[in-house]
Image: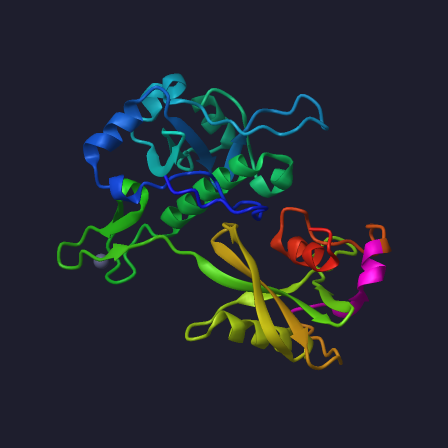
Amino acid sequence: MTDTRIPNPNFYANSGLDRVSHLRDEAEWLAARLGDPHSRLVPVWRAHNLFRPLAAPDQQPEPMLPTVEQLGSLANGTAHVVLLGLVDEVAHFALDLSHLEDPTQASALVGGGEFVDLRRYGPLIGHQAGAILAYARGILHWHSRHRFCGVCGAPTVSAQAGHVRQCTNPDCKAQHFPRTDPAVIMLVTDGDRCLLGRQAVWLPGMHSTLAGFVEPGESFEEAVAREVFEESGIRVRNVRYHSSQPWPFPASIMIGFHAEATTTEIDVDQSELEAAHWFTREWLLNSPENDHFRLPRRDSIARRLVESWLGRD
Ligand SMILES: [Zn+2]
């Protein structure tokens, strides 16, 4: 496989999976992988992933990826599966248990464990496991929202190992592909200070970079400039790409930038932000995180953009 891993990737990126898109049409190969006792299943129940129950609150959370050998009949049954790819030649399938009424029923089917929102554990789990769980959750969310054809309204069915939904209307036959919505996220700087804002619904004291969805017919750079101006009244130039982060909560990819302010007077759009302020590098480096001020979570690209600018990355 091609090693696409980069040094210091963002969390939820770089799953280590070879997505083997050329094999998604190979029915025999797929059936063999689903019957292979070593293949692994990534159970998802209504956007929640499966973890071993914590024995103590400070224990490190551990995802559960049962093998086909452990769950055999389930993988070959009627439950919906999506081929995620191969890790060291071992096939991984997302297993959708969302049709079950409650998580304990789903848990019983997969041999125990707890269904938890991945964002609750985030960076506490291994990087590669976090990326695989996020991918499983994201693609099953797409399936759940595309059960009917957007062209003619007929039901769709999963095809190509779960990477296409095919319209069942013979007069339509439209194919629908998994969606990822691009959002830009940017740290705006003015010399030795940077712009951070907060939304009223966030944790007390949390301040973060500005962000927003890319609109049709718009480049990422244009979206950065537009969003920054809309939210804060600041104009920017020299928009420079930093890195990207899959954010399938439920269906985004964050494209991260640094940008230089050309104006400094803040005019906050109160419908988007509660406040926005300039923070100096020195203040951020020396400020304890508490209910008066805190940076975003460590698994977010927002945090990475700030840490990178601070030189702590
Ligand atoms: Zn259709």
Q: Residue at x 50, y 31 (%)?
A: 103
Q: Residue at x 70, y 53 (%)?
A: 296
What colouring method underlies this structural image?
rainbow
- The number of callouts visible is 0
Residue 84: quadrant of the picture: top left
Image quadrant for the N terminus? top left
Q: Which residues are the magenta region? A: 272-285
On screen, residue 227 above or below 291:
below
Q: In the image, 212: left or right of 177? A: right
In the rendering, at what x and y percent does residue 122 appear? Answer: 61, 41
In the rendering, at what x and y percent does residue 252 appear? Answer: 49, 56
Q: Residue at x 76, y 72 (%)?
A: 191
Residue 306: quadrant of the picture: bottom right
On screen, residue 115 above or below 197:
above
Nearer to the camera, 148 or 267? 267
Q: In the image, 163: left or right of 247? A: left
Q: In the image, 195: left or right of 280? A: left
- Can residue 78 be seen here? yes
Q: Is residue 137 magenta?
A: no
In the rendering, at what x and y percent does residue 270 appear? Answer: 69, 73
Nearer to the camera, 82 or 39? 39
Ligand 1 location (quadrant): bottom left
- Can residue 76 be seen here? no
Q: Residue at x 72, y 62 (%)?
A: 200
In the rendering, at what x and y percent does residue 62 appear? Answer: 58, 28
Nearer to the camera, 256 or 151? 256
Q: In the image, 260: left or right of 78? A: right
Q: Which residue is at the far left?
A: 171
Nearer to the camera, 107 or 51? 51
